[in-house]
Image (tube, rainbow, N blue to C red):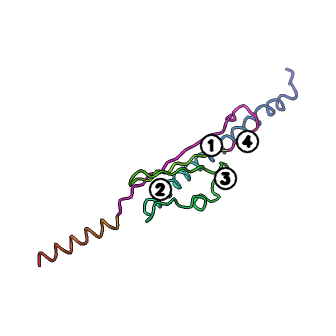
Amino acid sequence: MRRLKGYMTLEASLIVPMVICVFVIIISFAYYLYGRCILSQDAYILAFRTSIADSKEYPKVDEKLGNKYFGSTKPVIKTEVNGNEVIVRGYANVRTRAMGNFFLKPKTGWDYMAAGRAKDLDCIRHIRKIKRYKDLGEGLLE
């Protein structure tokens, strides 16, 4: 039986680049999940802070977002106020330029979006009202 030399070299030249591409895809997907989770959290925090603010001015978005979106573009934040409800939407994209034009690479990257919603319930006024009713009730019972 004759053994072919170079068989292992040929196999390694095909398998190793595929494995490396799979690892890069997994890392890119981890960036996607991380960015999506952080954006969801930031969107809700921004909506909540806007809803409890005395004036309905938008909070400083750049201070809140910071530099934690590595592997992704900086999110674009859009805020709208409808009556007593504040809706904050954020859009971002995972950068996938590291892989060039390999076979598994997404062509346009992965876009993700998150939204946060909070209602202004004016809790302080409600708490004061309930406390006042309680005080009046205790006064009537005495």
Farthest-out residue, left: 141
Residue on which disc 2 sits: 47
At label 1, counting other C-alpha atoms closer than 10 Å, the crowd grade (few under 14, some 14-19, many 20 or more) is some
The residue under label 1 is which amino acid type?
A: Phe
Q: Position of residue 21 (x, y in %)?
A: 72, 38
The reply to whether the magenta stretch includes residue 98 is yes
Does 119 appear above or below 138? above
Q: Nearer the viewer, mark 2 or mark 4?
A: 2
Residue on which disc 4 sits: 97
Give the Cα separation between the discs numbered 2 and 4: 32 Å
The residue under label 2 is which amino acid type?
A: Ala
In the rendered structure, which disc, 4 or 3, sits on the residue that comes first in sequence?
3
Quadrant containing the C terminus in the rendered view: bottom left
Residue on which disc 1 sits: 29
In the rendered structure, which disc, 3 or 2, sits on the residue that comes first in sequence?
2
Q: Determine the secondary structure under disc 2.
A: helix
Highlighted range, magenta: 95-122
Of 10 and 77, nearer the camera is 77
User: Which disc is residue 70 wearing?
Assistant: 3
Q: Residue at x 16, y 75 (%)?
A: 138
Quadrant containing the N terminus in the rendered view: top right
